[in-house]
Image (cartoon, grey):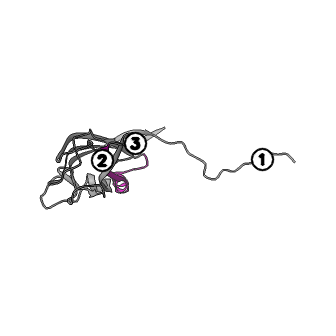
Amino acid sequence: MSRKAPHLVVDLEIQAVTCPGVWLCPNGNVQLLFSMLGQEVQTKRLPPVFPLLFHEKLTFQKTFPNAGCLAEVQDSLSREDVYAVLLQEVEDPSGGAAVQLARFHSNALHILYPSPCAKGLLAGVDVDLLMEASADYPGILCPKIELSTKTVVKEITSPVQEGYIINPKTLSSQVN
């Protein structure tokens, strides 16, 4: 048995990470780790020089089998955490390690459907995410992720999960 369920496909086009006037340690490449909809994706590694020009497209997908309408998907997105972490590789005698330079945290709804701004831009186009610097970050200004988003909701056929017993009882059929 199957039923229809909303399936969300999110394309994040990460253009750059910028921070004018900040110089990173030249020893070790830099990459961005992005976590959304229960998936974690890393960008390519770049030399540690701002602006970090990623020009990379990341795709995230999730099916909401219990959502009956788009309002329920929207409610679920407001509870989905989104993390972005700027990492720099460091040379460690015991093996490869990375230092967290900056971090961004929000909910998916805020990233995918930001509140309208005075510029009159479309939702998802030219989104800027201001990161929080860690103690290991060398600058005073915090880095900013420049990206755009494209969100598509499709209706797919999803298998219905089998029922389960909440309060099992055992009956005995003994003849007295």
Q: Is residue 142 above or below residue 29?
A: below
Q: Quick check: marks 3 and 1 in contact, CB under 8 Å? A: no
Gap in angstroms between the C-alphas marked 2 and 1? 62 Å
> Looking at this rendering, what residue extends furthest in the front direction?
93
Position of residue 9 measured from the top left corner of the image (x, y, whole percent): 31, 42
The first of marks 2 and 3 along the sequence is 3
Q: Which residue is mark 3?
A: 4
> Looking at this rendering, what residue extends furthest in the left direction?
119
Q: Is residue 37 left or right of residue 116?
A: right
Q: Is residue 169 left or right of residue 84?
A: right
Q: Residues within 10 Å of mark 2 (few under 14, many from 20)?
A: many
Circle 2: element type: strand
What residue range appears in magenta?
65-90
Position of residue 137 measured from the top left corner of the image (x, y, whole percent): 26, 55
Nearest-to-viewer mark from 2 and 1: 2
Q: Which residue is mark 1?
A: 172
Disc 3 marks a residue whose amino acid type is Lys
Q: Which residue is mark 2?
A: 87
Position of residue 138 measured from the top left corner of the image (x, y, whole percent): 24, 55
Q: Nearer the viewer, residue 63 or 85?
A: 85
Disc 2 marks a residue whose amino acid type is Leu
Q: Nearer the viewer, residue 175 or 95?
A: 95
Position of residue 72 measured from the top left corner of the image (x, y, whole percent): 37, 54
Q: Residue at x 14, y 54 (%)?
A: 20
